[in-house]
Image (spheres, helix red, strand yellow):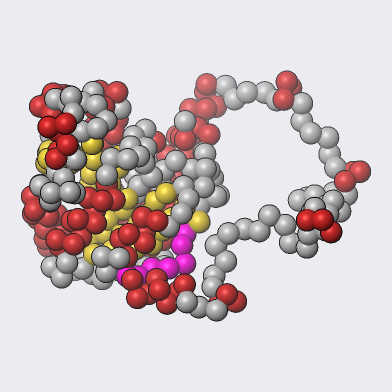
């Protein structure tokens, strides 16, 4: 569980490109020496003849091979006690919550409406996001942070709409956290009164526990997943304020009870608002945009009141 093991700690990489299609294209057209290094080399040593890597002369800590400290015997490594695990979990979440509060204050000061989009992999959240941004074009200044373990595929899809996007690759980590968002924001030039959409790593478990500083979590549930997901993963649906029941254009071809899925979600979270959507047909996208515009208006009004 991420809150106890700190999975992927220190492995997150924040992309070098933030912008729409033109900015992304310009970055990829730079001379190789000008491109920022985003991947850590496995070794700085040149390969030995025959493509074999040379034997190291010293390890990471500077010990020559013959003088390295012996590896710990796994049988003699004490496992953390339940009390210690609880302390670690509380410490991780407390640090994250402090950073999330700082992010939230920064958003509020500038009237930025930030949403955290969460779902399991394959729910169609990127396709739905693209469809919504296309419909929103020119109406609201927007930017996107994309979270995935690897690749910039989703960020590139967002940039193709003309909306600037920044990719965060979490490596072995299975969720974004508030610190990653804070570092990403330092590389972004967000307009005051704008919309920030954070597409989290596909995972219905760990992102529920990590506040990013968003105004709302938006859960996406695809009709291809099974209507019992809200009961199997209740923490995520309890943490969300909006549920997008996605891919409803496929309902005629599936054995899926949409009413039951919604009932299960409302059983977990009675205050949850539900919109049925389809990236293919555009169903529900207008209603989602109306919800976004209302939230953005409130964020802008809050900024004016606190100024």
Indicate the position of residue 158 as horizontal and vertical percent values: 30, 61
Count of picture labels: 0
Magenta residue span: 14-20
**Residue 109 at least partly seen:** no
Residue at image x 17%, y 49%?
280
Indicate the position of residue 32 as horizontal and vertical percent values: 57, 75
Residue at image x 52%, y 38%?
6
Q: Is residue 268 left or right of residue 189?
A: left
Residue at image x 52%, y 23%?
83
Indicate the position of residue 227 as horizontal and vertical percent values: 21, 26
> Furthest residue to the right?
66
Please, is residue 221 above or below residue 305 in the view? above
Please, is residue 127 above or below residue 299 in the view? above
Q: Is residue 31 left or right of residue 175?
A: right
Q: Nearer the viewer, residue 212 or 161?
A: 161
Indicate the position of residue 45 as horizontal and vertical percent values: 78, 61
Q: For the C terminus, which image quadrant?
A: bottom left
**Residue 47 at least partly seen:** yes
Q: Is residue 166 left or right of residue 275?
A: right
Q: Is residue 26 left or right of residue 131?
A: right
Overall secondary structure of the magenta section: loop
Residue at image x 52%, y 27%?
85
Q: Nearer the viewer, residue 52 or 268?
A: 52
Q: Nearer the viewer, residue 86 or 172?
A: 172
Q: Is residue 262 magenta?
A: no
Please, is residue 4 above or below residue 62 in the view? above
């Amino acid at each position: 569980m991420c809150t106890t093991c700190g999975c992927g700690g220190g492995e997150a990489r924040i992309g070098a490109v933030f912008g729409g299609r033109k900015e992304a294209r310009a970055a990829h057209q730079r001379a190789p020496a000008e491109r920022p290094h985003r991947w850590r080399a496995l070794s700085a040593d040149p390969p030995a003849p025959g493509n074999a890597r040379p034997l190291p002369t010293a390890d990471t800590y500077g010990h020559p091979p013959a003088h390295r400290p012996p590896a710990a015997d796994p049988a003699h490594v004490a496992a953390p006690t339940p009390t210690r695990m609880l302390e670690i979990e509380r410490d991780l979440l407390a640090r994250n919550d402090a950073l999330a509060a700082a992010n939230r204050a920064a958003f509020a000061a500038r009237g930025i409406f930030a949403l955290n989009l969460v779902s399991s992999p394959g729910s169609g959240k990127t396709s739905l996001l693209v469809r919504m941004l296309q419909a929103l074009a020119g109406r609201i200044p927007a930017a996107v942070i994309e979270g995935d373990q690897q690749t910039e595929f989703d960020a590139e899809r967002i940039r193709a709409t003309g909306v600037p996007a920044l990719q965060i690759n979490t490596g072995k980590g299975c969720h974004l956290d508030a610190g990653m968002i804070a570092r990403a924001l330092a590389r972004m030039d967000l307009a005051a009164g704008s919309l920030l959409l954070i597409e989290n790593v596909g995972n219905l478990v760990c992102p529920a526990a990590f506040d990013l500083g968003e105004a709302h979590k938006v859960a996406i549930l695809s009709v291809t997943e099974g209507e019992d997901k809200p009961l199997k993963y209740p923490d995520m649906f309890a943490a969300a304020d909006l549920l997008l029941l996605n891919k409803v254009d496929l309902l005629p071809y599936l054995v899926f009870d949409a009413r039951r899925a919604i009932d299960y979600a409302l059983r977990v979270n009675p205050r949850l608002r539900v919109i049925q959507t389809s990236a293919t047909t555009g169903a529900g996208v207008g209603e989602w945009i109306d919800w976004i515009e209302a939230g953005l208006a409130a964020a802008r009004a809050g900024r004016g009141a606190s100024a």
